[in-house]
Image: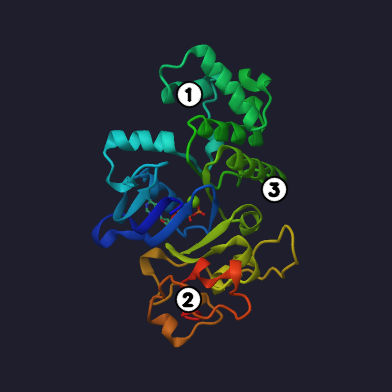
Amino acid sequence: TDAVLEIRGLNVDYGLGDEAVHAVRDVDLTLHRGEVLGLAGESGSGKSTLAYGLTRLLPPPGVIASGEVLYHPDGGDPVDVLRMTLPELRRFRWAETAIVFQGAMNSLNPVHRISSQLTDVIKAHDPRSTPASRLARARELLRLVGISADRLDSYPHQLSGGMRQRVMIGMALALEPKVVIMDEPTTALDVVVQRQILRQLVELRERLGFSVVFITHDLSLLVEFSDRIAIMYGGRIVEEAASADLYRDPLHPYSHGLLNSFPALRGPKRELTGIPGSPPDLRAMPSGCAFHPRCPHAMERCGVEVPVLGTPGDVHPGHDAGENAPADRTVACWLHP
Ligand code: ATP
Ligand code: MG
């Protein structure tokens, strides 16, 4: 396959036993080589927990209850990230997968110049490099993310939020990762800056050939910049499809509601209706489909049986030819058994 990451049956809890909160439930998700995969869902749906879990950076009391995360190195045998030894994991994290966390732009060290923060990362990655080569590499990385080299001597507070964010991306790229995970890297930035940074990341992905998992609330950004989108609700993936298909024809009522919660950046205007009600309490999940109490189409079955994520049996006639083949999309909803 052309998969670079395959998440299978992943369950992540916070806490143990009766106290456990099931924040990620039975997640199956594949990241293909070179693609931008968007992950969307309301606050608390488990997006960050999924990102932390698959890289084993879960803060306590987070625990991976079950599952596997298969990483496919170029030309090598797949390895299960969840079963790696610590040294293997350290190398994997830095060399293969780079993460830019929620609020990461504020994690630059305020008392060190941009140059030394970049060269430190390069040195950690390649201890035998020379100071001169590290500086040259730092300059090149800044150029890649659209910052002029004379900013090397700046301190973080001398840069705008957007520039700091670009520096963080540059640091992530210092390691020539195969996978870049960005967890809402742009919430603190204005919309114009968000879009510029995302566009740049997508361009770099084409040039440097990495894959991206991009996590955000803002589905309109994902529709514009990602190849595929996975929607999370109450810790589960409820729908996954090519961006264009999801935008044109969302199958899950929750996806439909989310799409109508954000102004579209292009394409026909939708009426912004939002989703009534609030996300589920993970300690008291509704029976059956977790979305059923908020769903305008809920049927009796929805309150009883949890729908399984699978190929919709009934994708709209006329829509299921060629690139819209139903096999390209999955949904967990009794409207599409
Ligand atoms: P947001 O969009 O706000 O970033 P998210 O989709 O990233 O939300 P997570 O941060 O993954 O959501 O949280 C998923 C669930 O796990 C939430 O209900 C949250 O309250 C719970 N949770 C997160 N961290 C912890 C923790 N350290 N201990 C207990 N519960 C936690
Ligand atoms: Mg989050």
Residue 284 vs residue 228: left or right? Answer: left
Q: Is residue 114 visible?
A: no
Q: Earlier in the sequence, mark 3 or mark 2?
A: 3
- What amino acid type is highlighted by mark number 2? Cys
Residue 78 percent across, percent down from the top left: 34, 47
Q: Which mark is residue 133?
A: none
Q: Is residue 316 above or below residue 125?
A: below
* Residue position marked by numbered label 2 in the rendering: 333
For marks 1 and 3, give the CA distance: 31 Å
Which residue is painted at 58% across and 42% down in the image?
A: 205
Label 1 CB less than 8 angstroms from ligand 2:
no
Q: Which quadrant: the N terminus?
A: bottom left
Q: Is residue 231 above or below residue 332?
A: above
Residue 268 vs residue 14: left or right? Answer: right
Q: Are marks 1 and 2 in contact (CB under 8 Å)?
A: no
Which residue is painted at 39% across and 46% down in the image?
A: 72
How many residues crowd mark 1 within 10 Å: few (<14), some (14–19), many (20+)? many
- Res 97 → quadrant: top left
Q: Which mark is residue 191?
A: 3
- Res 274 → quadrant: bottom right
Q: Is residue 284 above or below residue 6?
A: below
Q: Which mark is residue 122?
A: 1
Residue 57 percent across, percent down from the top left: 37, 43
Q: Are marks 3 and 2 in contact (CB under 8 Å)?
A: no
Residue 223 percent across, percent down from the top left: 64, 58
Q: Is residue 232 visible?
A: yes
Which residue is painted at 57% across and 44% down in the image?
A: 185
Q: Earlier in the sequence, mark 1 or mark 2?
A: 1
Q: Secondary structure at mark 1?
A: helix
- What amino acid type is highlighted by mark number 1? Ile
Q: Nearer the viewer, mark 3 or mark 2?
A: 2
Q: Nearer the viewer, residue 160 or 321?
A: 321
